[in-house]
Image: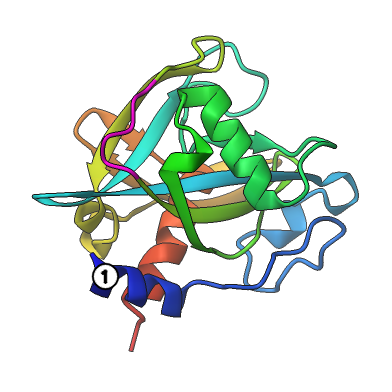
Amino acid sequence: MADFAGQLRQVLATREPPVPPVEIPDDVPDRDLVPTSELRPAAVLVPLIDRPDGWQVLLTQRTEHLPHHAGQISFPGGRLEMTDSTPVSGALRETEEEIGVEAARVKIIGSLSVLPTITGFVVVPVVGMVDPDYRLQLDRSEVDSAFEVPLDFLVDRGNHVTEWATYRGRRRSYTVIQYQQRRIWGATAQMIVDLTNRLHPLS
């Protein structure tokens, strides 16, 4: 655990990420589709769990009636509120509200790149190690289910499939990761690709 935690700290950004307004990097996919004038700050927790058979990642499936990303696989988190002093505090608050995992059971080790989305959010992905003895208490108004996926599976580029769709009249590509009956795509898949590239840099 210590070796992997040390590796993660080396590859993750350690500075407090900015909140809007932010400059969107040129390498953000389809950056011209992101509504920069309307970006709302958000944060998610990328929860890692150390199990005897390997590291796991905790994910959620959102309920079908939500206004944004309904039914999608996502990390716990959401829009920042005025009471959130930092993206980290917001990610921890949302995690406890959505799935019942208390902040005391999470050890923050860094963050991934800030991610603007075509739905009008700028998301800070906060990475944390979760106590393996955590207990779930789902907010059924937002979360349909929560489940663990092996980290090795998610960061295996062989499981990253590129698909294409037309959005706002433009053909665009996106990554899909199929795990059993679960389809992981959108912003969540982009964050996983970011983590993959940090843990396994391309030569």
Query: Across the whole image, how many numbered discs are drawn on residues?
Result: 1
Tell me the quarter of the picture where residue 70 sits: top right
**Display colour scheme:** rainbow
Q: Position of residue 19 (x, y in %)?
A: 79, 57
The quarter of the rendered structure image containing the N terminus is: bottom left
| Residue 164 visible in this rendered orientation of the protein | no
Q: Is residue 187 left or right of residue 3?
A: right
| Prevalent SS, magenta region | loop
Residue farthest along the bottom direction in this orientation? 203
Is residue 106 shown to the viewer in this render? yes
Please state which of residues 147 and 110 is positioned toward the viewer in this rendering. 110
In the figure, 154 relative to 203: above or below? above
Camera-nearest residue between 186 and 107: 107
The residue type indicated by label 1 comes to Ala
Query: How far from the left and from the top, in percent, is residue 168?
Result: 71, 41
Residue 109 pos. (x, y %): 47, 63
* Magenta range: 131-136
State left or right for residue 20 relative to residue 174: right
* Quadrant for the C terminus in the image: bottom left
- For mark 1, does the 10 Å Cα neighbourhood hold few (<14), some (14 to 19), or many (20 or more) residues? few
Instruction: Write down the residue under mark 1.
Output: 2
Does the magenta run of residues contain 149? no
Q: Secondary structure at mark 1?
A: helix
Residue at the far front in the pictured view: 104
Q: Residue at x 38, y 36 (%)?
A: 59
Residue 198 lies, in percent from the top left, at 41, 74
The answer to whether 16 is drawn above or below residue 74 in the figure is below
Q: Tell me which residue sits at (65%, 61%) in the image.
A: 114
Of all residues, the one furthest to the right in this rendering is: 37
Between 128 and 169, the residue placed more toward the observer is 128
Residue at 85 percent across and 37 percent down: it is 82
